[in-house]
Amino acid sequence: MSGRKRVAVLISGRGSNMAALVKAAETPDFPAEIALVLSNRADAAGLAFAQEHGIETLVLSHKDYADRIAFDAALDAHLRIAGIEIICLAGFMRLLTPWLVERWRDRMINVHPSLLPSFKGLDTHARAIETGVRFHGCTVHFVRAEMDAGPIILQAAVPVQDDDTPDVLAARVLEQEHVIYPQGLGLLAAGRLAVEQERVFVDGATPLREVMIAPQV
Ligand code: GAR
């Protein structure tokens, strides 16, 4: 299919969200193709999956660059050479410079394992259990310079059960990440999203239904 947006998925490890995006992009009518999987770690397990699916991979180690600015400049150059139009961060555990984030404004999205703006950062599932929230979940959002912040595209909520461990809760949330991340990328690649005053609109309307996805468990 021609006219599909060229997407780079940036990973640092397991890559299960990347795999979900790859599988979605393999369906005939998906409006994006995964043209590149880039990792900042050579040992990222997800690289093998991408290669098995015939996707170009690239390792760009941050250790080879003097600072964040130099790393992000190299990253940006590689993405542009590859003709990338959309970036999906998928467990990419690097803070990006405001320069790079601005350069890709409203063309870079992320998935985070919490209902933002709650539980930014790491160990979200343990913190959700400790805090006693009844619902937890995941968020697909546009990336802004502040960590785990930016206009929200989609969220999925899951219940927190009394006997949940962080691992059990993480698995319940991850299942939903794999649902909403491809949906969010599909909306962006199809040109169906607009950001106005840092709120996301789908097809010109407030996306009430599309934001509130019931847990599919
Ligand atoms: C996912 O749970 C993702 O939401 C999280 O890292 C995990 C990566 O797993 N990302 C963040 O915490 C970003 N702030 P994966 O490599 O299997 O997709």
Image (cartoon, rainbow, N blue to C red):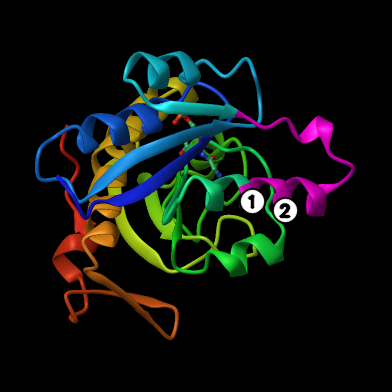
CB at mark 2 closer than 8 A to ligand 1? no
Assign the C terminus to one quadrant of the image.
Answer: top left
- Residue 144 position, x and y percent, is 57, 65
Q: Main secondary structure of the magenta part?
A: helix
- The residue labelled by disc 1 is 77
Residue 185's label in the rendered image is none
At horizontal 52% and vertical 60% (from top left) the residue drawn is: 143
The relative height of residue 79 versus residue 160 in the rendered view (above or below) is: below
Q: Are marks 2 and 1 in contact (CB under 8 Å)?
A: yes
Pick whichever, 98 or 75, lies toward us. 75
Pick whichever, 23 or 180, lies toward us. 23
**Mark whose residue sits in front, 2 or 1:** 1
Whether residue 114 is visible: yes
Type of residue at label 1?
Ala
Whether residue 119 is visible: no
Label 1 secondary element: helix
Q: Which stretch did the figure color magenta?
A: 59-77
The crowd level at tag 2 (other Cα within 10 Å; few <14, some 14-19, many 20+) is some
> Left or right of 188: which side holds 74?
right
- The residue labelled by disc 2 is 73
The quarter of the displayed image where residue 49 is located = top left
Tell me the distance, in whole angstroms, between the alpha carbons under discs 2 and 1: 6 Å
